[in-house]
Amino acid sequence: MPMDSKSKHPTQLALPSLYNLLYHLNITIIMSPSVIFPSTFDDVAAAVRQARSQGLDLSVRCGGHMTLPAVSSVVIDLGRNLNSITIDAENKLAYIQGGCRFSQVEKEATKFGLAVPAGACADAGVGGLATGGGYGWLSGEHGLTLDSLISATVVLANGDIVKANAAEHSDLFWGIRGGGSNFGIVVEFVFKLHSQRSEVYTTTLTYAPSLLPIVIQQINRWTRKQTPNEAGRLMFGPDSQGKPAVVFVGFKNSGAKEGEAAFKGFVELGPLENVSGMIPYEKLNTMLDSYNAPGHRLHWGLHLERLDLKPFKKALEAFTNLLTEHPEAVSSFVTFEFHHNDKIASVPTEATAFAHRAPVYNVLVTTQWEKAAFTAVAQAATRELADTIAKAASTDLATNIGYPNYADAVAGKNKTDTYSRLAFGANYERLQEVKKMYDPEGVFSKWFAIQPAA
C-alpha cells in the first residue's frame, strides 16, 4: 500500500490506516505525532520502509500494557487491525497476530480446553510478553511463554517479511525468544498449545500488616513443597481506606479439594478476608485487574535470591511511607512472585536469548498516579522504594534489574549498552551478532537496545 514519498513531516505519512494526530500510547513517557494502524503484514512492511526512507524514528505498539521508554516520530500500532486468532485444536497450535492481547487468546483457546502460558494480566499484549520472557501462573508446568513459541512471522528493518523457526532463520528465532523488539516486528506468532482444565483454584487472603513475619514464614514452608501446578504472589497494596494491606494470592491448577489443601497453612494464619474457590480458567488473569489504575504508571523490577524477612519488612515500611507521604500514589503496589522454577530452568540458558532462568523470585514495584505534575516525584519515589528492597536483600539496583519485562525504568536508557548487558547476560554477545545480521542500523532500539557486533 503506497505512502506519499514526498512527505517530510511525520504527520504527513499517507497510509489509509495512518491517523495524523497526537496519539497517546502511554501517558507516563510516550507521545507520538503519528500512528499507523496497519491492516496487513504488507502494510507493516511498507510503514517500516517509508519511515526509514524519511529518517523517522520508529516504535511499535502491540497490546500497550506496559510503558515504553522512548519518544518516536512514528508508531506502528498493531492492536486495532492485526488481532486475529486461529486455533488448530487437532494439532494444538495457535496462530496469533501481533496486536492480540492474552485475554483474546484465552477466550479462544479455552473453547477447546487448551491454553498458551500467559502472564498474570489479561490485557498484556502477546508481542511484548512473548518476546521478553513470559512468567505467569502456568510457568511451573509449561515454562515461559516464549518456551511454547514454535514459529513467527517477522517484518525486518529492511521491510522484508520472513518466517523464523527452528528450520528457517533459526538465529532470528533464537533472538526473538528473549531479545524483545530488537530485530523486527513480529506480526504473527505460532504457539504450541497445552491441555488446560476449564476451572482452577485460587485464593486471595488479606492480612493485617502486623502479620507479615508469619506470612513470610508460611511462604517459605509452602515454597519448599510447592508443586509445578502451584504459583503465588505476595502483594502490598492499598485497602479500601488507602492504608497498606498485605495480600497473598495463590493458584493451583486443580480442583477445590487439592487447592484448599495446598494453601491451608495460609488460611490458618487468620486473614482479615478470604476469597477462595474455583474460577473459570479464562478469568484467572483478571484477578489482579483492580490493581491496574488508569493514568500514569512506572515499573521497576529486581530479583530476590532468598525469602528472608528483611527485604519484605523494609519493602512494607517503604510502601507505607510512600502512601503516607504521597497520597497521589495511593493506587501503587509491590509484588513478589513465587513460581515453581524447575520447568523454566530445564531449558539451557543458551537455548534462547532469555538469560534469567536461575531459581530467583521476581519483584515488581509499580507506582501509579493521575496528574502529570507528579511524574518526577513518582519516578524518584519508585527508585527509592526499589532501592530499599535491593539494599535489604544485599544487592544493588545498578546490577540487579530483575526480569527485563518489568524493567521499564531502565529499558530505554540506551546511550550505552550497560543495561542491555544486564538484561541479556551471557547471551549478549550472540545477540550482537544477530543484531548485525538483521538490524545493523538499529532501527528497532527502544527496549534494551543491542549494539550490533563490529
Image: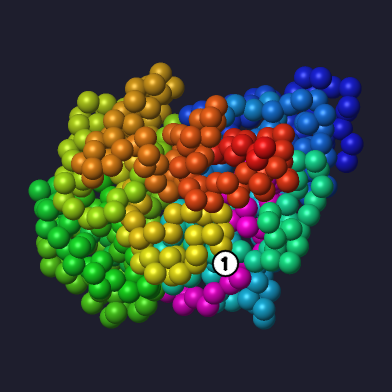
Secondary structure beneath dot 1 equals: helix
Q: Amino acid at mark 1?
A: Ser
Percent position of residue 234, x then y? 27, 54
Q: Nearer the viewer, residue 46 or 424?
A: 424
Question: Label 1 belongs to which residue?
Answer: 148
- Determine if the magenta segment contains residue 206: no
Q: Quadrant of residue 13?
A: top right
Q: How many marks?
A: 1
Color scheme of the displayed model: rainbow
Residue ID at (34%, 56%): 360
Percent position of residue 286, x then y? 43, 56
Residue ID at (45%, 69%): 346
Q: Quadrant of residue 151?
A: bottom right
Above-or-below relation of 253 to 215: below
Percent position of residue 265, x then y? 16, 69
Residue ID at (44%, 54%): 356
Q: Is residue 8 left or right of residue 337?
A: right
Q: Nearer the viewer, residue 49 or 454?
A: 454
Which contiguous range is marked in magenta? 173-200
Above-or-below relation of 79 to 337: above
Percent position of residue 193, x then y? 58, 72
Camera sees residue 319: no
Q: Nearer the viewer, residue 326 or 127?
A: 127
Q: Is residue 52 left or right of residue 283?
A: right
Can you say which quadrant of the picture contains the C terminus? top right
Can you say which quadrant of the picture contains the N terminus? top right
Q: Nearer the viewer, residue 66 or 183?
A: 183
Q: Is residue 395 left or right of residue 366?
A: left
- Determine if the magenta segment contains residue 198: yes
Above-or-below relation of 400 to 219: above
Residue ID at (34%, 48%): 303
Camera sees residue 147: yes
